[in-house]
Image (cartoon, coloured by chain):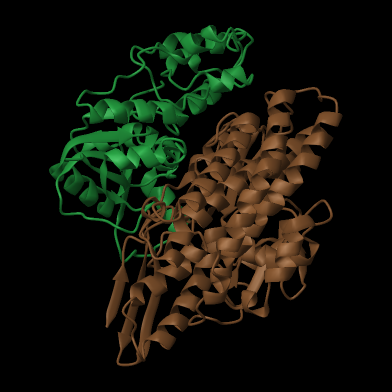
Amino acid sequence: MKINIMPLARVEGEGGIYVEMEDERVKEVRMDIYEGPRLIETVVLGKRPDDVISIVTRICSICSTSHRLASVRGFERAGGVEVPEKIRLLRKLVHYGEYIESHSLHYYLLALPDFFGYPDAISMAEKYGDLVLGGLELKKFGNFIMETINGKAIHGENIRIGYMGRIPEKDALEHIKSRALALIPVIEDGIMAFPAMEIPDYMEEETNFICLVPEDDGFGFIGNTIITSKGERFDVEEYKKVTNERVVPHSFAKRSSYAGSPFTVGALARVNILGERLPGKAGDFFRRLWSERWKRNPLFNNLAQAIEILFCLEQIPPLVDRILSLPDPELKEPEVKEGEGTGAVEAPRGTLYHHYKVENGRTVECDIITPTAQNLDDMEKYLRRAAENLVKNPPEDFELRLELIPRAYDPCISCSVHMLRVKVKK
Amino acid sequence: MKPKVGFYELTGCAGDMLNMLNCEDQLLSLFDVVEVKSFAMASSAHDEDTELDIAFVEGSVSTEENLHLLKRVREKSKILVAVGHCAIFGGVQISENNWEERLKKVYGDVNFIHTRPIPHEPLGMFVRVDAVIPGCPINKHQFLSAAGKLLLGTMPELYNFAVCAECKWKENECLLMKGKICLGPITRGGCGAICPTHNIPCIGCFGPVEEENVSSEYKLLLEKGYSPEELRNRMKIFGGKVREVK
């Protein structure tokens, strides 16, 4: 029996699943990635850093803000550029906006339809109208934050290396604060709607998790240290030790493994490694809902995303107050002439690395490693386990049960295809 | 009968499709007046056999599979709309030459088993395109306006003026005059001049405007002290193949 699902629906980008079985034996399992390669990282070579940050943002729409933040951090570390505190905090806020938008799009509109048995959120809306509308409200709010701070919800240009073009106005920030407070009950209902008790276990298997240690204490999404679920720590400049890329023939996305084993990055990794640090109601939900199964079952990534939405909403009011209490810094453009550095952030889907080398004010090396590319090996591992368990007594919805797995990872296939390493030889 | 509509994604960042999904307030009512036959990013239900009234296609043609899909969609659709910069101009990926060399640098000698990558091209290189919605990404209000017109049986119109016009309406200080490489004068308007309003020079993401005067802008910036190399690099990013900067 062969199962070939293409295109994989309700994900960003073009991918598919291929599973081949002989009798009751699983012969081959592949996450096929046939989204075309754009070779973005070769396009940036020879260009000025301020051109490069505009180009790499275009790698992906859903995580364009994370790409922007990782790229400016990479150039800032390369050039030793200091970032004023107010701008650092505004970046944190815009990042929360991206999390709210991206996670709510995935959780409410792409993932929940699976659990309630619908092909999409539009048809789910007939019976679960409040849930879908709540998801849309959250998504809209996330976009509003990104528009306010970065100029646009997708591919905004206001975040610059070492500065920003314009500091958002007080009224807009106050509005963000009050909307965040108003939306907390919406996501609380959203979390409760997740049928945690009915999550199937046909793919369960232990795995490794990797994420960044937040630069401020507590839970968060920006940092310079990598941590694994085994407790090992690495400086982000050593990121290649944990990513170890290779090319495979069935995918335009390269693959990663750590110490010879696949691993998972993203909301589930962050919550499994750092969940004890979650404050407020997000922390309460974590302690109430978390179980050992979260370490074995990727479907809990959906719930981890919902908890992170709540975390972001709760963090916004005090963050806005702090931003407003600080004076506006002088907005001037620093020049990055020479240097090499790595900028990393936790994108909604997991750890994102941007590495740059600059000579004479031009980019001569670029290496971008995206979260979905890191997750592909683990997706295959879980698909294999699922197929092995299901093949003995094939269920009617075999395909859907396989599809659930990569979809839970919220794969961003556009991103995954554009990571690669390029070096200019002189 | 409701018009039958399909949404297709070739090679790109999916930002144009995402901006359609970002029409949170209108999404449910829009999907109520059309019959969506294919929208892989949003739904697992799809019907690829029915003829379409309108097909929205995003992304550049960058693999043989992309080309195959594009031709199939063209055949079965009355109106094909190129959505976003990649579909109309080829995207940022088209801005550099030596594609084969760069492909090899990235992937080595791997023989891909699904589909062969091909050098990036916009849709218009292969099929007739009936309408375009410009931008990287598109502006969602322009999408709603275009969709509305198409559903009523008329064709969407383009903003035939440069970003500078919108920038002036906002009474912004001119960044070009301040010596910045602002591409407002040679870029199609419709974005609302967001970047110059944030004191950031226009990078040209809505693509070249008709009758753009590239050489005049180029000369002006040379006089301001920029090198030909950095001006070419900036103008190429969203220049597609139409803007030959010599």
Residue A131 in percent (x, y) is at 51, 53
Count numbered badges in the picture: 0
Image: A107 above or below B59 = below
Image point 71% across, 24% down: which residue? A171
Image: A65 above or below A288 = above
Residue B100 in percent (x, y) is at 36, 49
Image point 36% across, 87% down: which residue? A391
Q: Is A201 or A235 nearer to us in this picture? A: A201
Instruction: Say left or right for A56 vs A226.
Output: left
The letter of the green chain is B
Q: Quadrant of residue B60?
A: top left
Q: Is A70 or A152 nearer to us in this picture? A: A152
Image: A24 above or below A17 = below
State which quarter of the image contains the N terminus of chain A: bottom left
Residue A107 in percent (x, y) is at 53, 57
One can see residue A75 in this view: no
One can see residue A289 in this view: yes
The letter of the brown chain is A
